[in-house]
């Protein structure tokens, strides 16, 4: 069983962007940003720009189902990132929105 301090730290950790990840979110004010309130944006940003530490935080913060849903639906992922994460999560490439031909 976790102590109160561990629970408080986990709650805080899951509701703010850690300092080492702030550079990935240069376009927003991260001081009041709650990643849980914007999972698609947060996950997409980490998938596209994150390093190993950022990915570790993402996996600890969001469910695999949430991450897989973003990989499938996020059109702003680059083809390189979309292909990589599709392979990592064993998602067929034809199910990845970022890899679909642009509609006119």
Image (cartoon, helix red, strand yellow):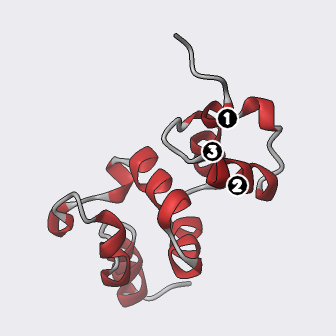
Q: Is residue 21 shown above or below 15?
A: below
CA gap, disc 1 to disc 2?
A: 12 Å
Q: Which is nearer the N-term, disc 3 or disc 2?
A: 3
Q: Quadrant of the N terminus?
A: bottom right
Between marks 3 and 1, how big is the CA–CA gap? 10 Å
Foreground label between 3 and 1: 1
What residue is rendered at 22% in x and 58% in y? 27
Q: Earlier in the sequence, mark 1 or mark 2?
A: 2
| Extreme residue toward the top, this view | 104
Q: Which residue is mark 3?
A: 71
Label 1 sits on a secondary structure element that is helix
- Residue behind mark 2: 85
Residue 7 rendering spot, x and y as whole percentages: 41, 79
Can you identify the residue that label 1 sits on? 99
Q: Residues within 10 Å of mark 2 (few under 14, many from 20)?
A: many
> Quick check: 23 left or right of 78?
left
Task: Sort mark 3 into few (<14), some (14-19) or many (20+) by Cα contacts within 10 Å.
Answer: many
Residue 4 appears at what percent x and percent y?
37, 85
Closest to the observer, 104 or 74: 104
Locate residue 70, reporting x and y percent. 57, 43
User: Disc 3 on helix, strand or loop?
Assistant: helix
Left/right of residue 90 with respect to residue 102 in the rendered view: right
Measured in 3D between alpha carbons, the distance from the residue under mark 3 to the one under mark 2, in whole angstroms, is 7 Å
Q: Is residue 52 above or below residue 89?
A: below
Q: Quadrant of residue 42?
A: bottom left
Q: Are marks 3 and 2 in contact (CB under 8 Å)?
A: yes
Q: Which mark is residue 61?
A: none
């Amino acid at each position: 069983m976790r102590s109160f301090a561990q629970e408080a730290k986990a709650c805080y950790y899951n509701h703010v962007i850690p300092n080492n990840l702030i550079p990935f979110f240069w376009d927003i004010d991260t001081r009041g940003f709650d990643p849980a309130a914007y999972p698609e944006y947060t996950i997409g940003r980490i998938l596209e720009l994150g390093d190993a530490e950022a990915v570790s935080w993402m996996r600890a913060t969001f469910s695999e189902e949430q991450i897989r849903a973003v990989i499938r639906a996020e059109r702003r992922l680059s083809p390189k990132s979309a292909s990589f994460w599709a392979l990592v999560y064993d998602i067929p490439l034809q199910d990845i929105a970022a890899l679909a031909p642009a509609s006119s």
